[in-house]
Image (tube, grey):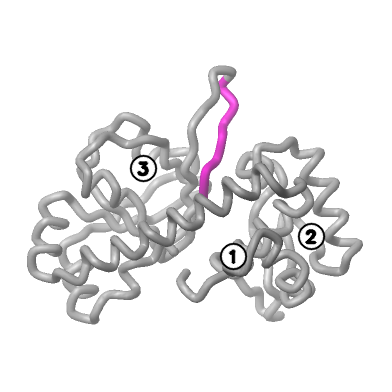
Amino acid sequence: MHAFVSELSPEARGAFEALSSLRRLGKGEAVYRQGDEPNELYQLVEGRVRLCNYSLEGKEVVSGEFQPGDCFGEMGMIDGLTRVSHAIASCDCVVRVLSRAGFDTLTAKFPEVDRKIAVMLCHRVRYLYSLNEEASELTLHQRVARCVLRMAYSRESNNPERELYIAISQEELGQMLGASRQSINKELKALVCEGSIELRYGRIYIQDLEQLKEQYEYLLGMEPITPGYQ
């Protein structure tokens, strides 16, 4: 859903890499801040970057988290408006940075870039619609299960034993769903009892992906929450 560069032709991907540069960030460093001018587009190479804002009480509200291969920062490159959220490194990261001049050069030479970005933004709008419906119609347990299901598809990692897991803390999951860590813990333990997941060392191990999909994918309609685009 965020990796439009991987959908480009080999020539366009090569041009993207040639026009961009690598930047390293430590955990907690900002890629950009809310209100910054949109002068760059980013692709995450290593690590994790979260999008967030803060309540009046200073509570962090996470709206999403990017994984290696994902691209972000493209909206401001198109509409010219300032950043609407903070992009913060959740751990040590490497990002590929494309300047506005590089972006203009790339899109002028390869019109496919504009179309791929447009398709990616449409996918994100669909995703946001589904999140809005979930927040108003589903229980926290169902929302937690669907969030885990999405992440299992879009950010899966495998250890040497080929076990599928998601590296995210319960606090981070709570920030994404607007719930306390205690509430998230309760719902995750319920999923453990269902046999869908296992909790180990700050990771969520997926025990039965098909069971998760069968139980929680089609709660609001017939459009899947884990579509073919990623």
Q: Is residue 63 left or right of residue 77?
A: right
User: Residue 98 at x, y = what percent?
Assistant: 22, 55
Residue beneath disc 3: 31
Residue 144 visible to the viewer: yes
Q: Secondary structure at mark 1?
A: loop
User: Residue 158 at x, y = what percent?
Assistant: 63, 74
Residue at image point 24% right, 67% down: 115
Query: Which one is nearer the viewer's eye here, 195 or 32?
Result: 195
User: Residue 183 at x, y = what percent?
Assistant: 80, 40
Q: CA distance from mark 2 to mark 1?
A: 26 Å
Query: Which one is nearer the viewer's eye here, 64 or 226?
Result: 226
User: Residue 118 at x, y = what percent?
Assistant: 29, 61
Residue beneath disc 1: 225
Residue 156 visible to the viewer: no
Q: Is residue 60 magenta?
A: yes
Residue at image point 24% right, 73% down: 13
What kind of secondary structure does the magenta stretch mostly adopt? strand
Say which amino acid is labelled 3: Val
Say which amino acid is labelled 2: Arg
Q: Nearer the viewer, mark 2 or mark 1?
A: 1
Q: CA distance from mark 2 to mark 3?
A: 30 Å
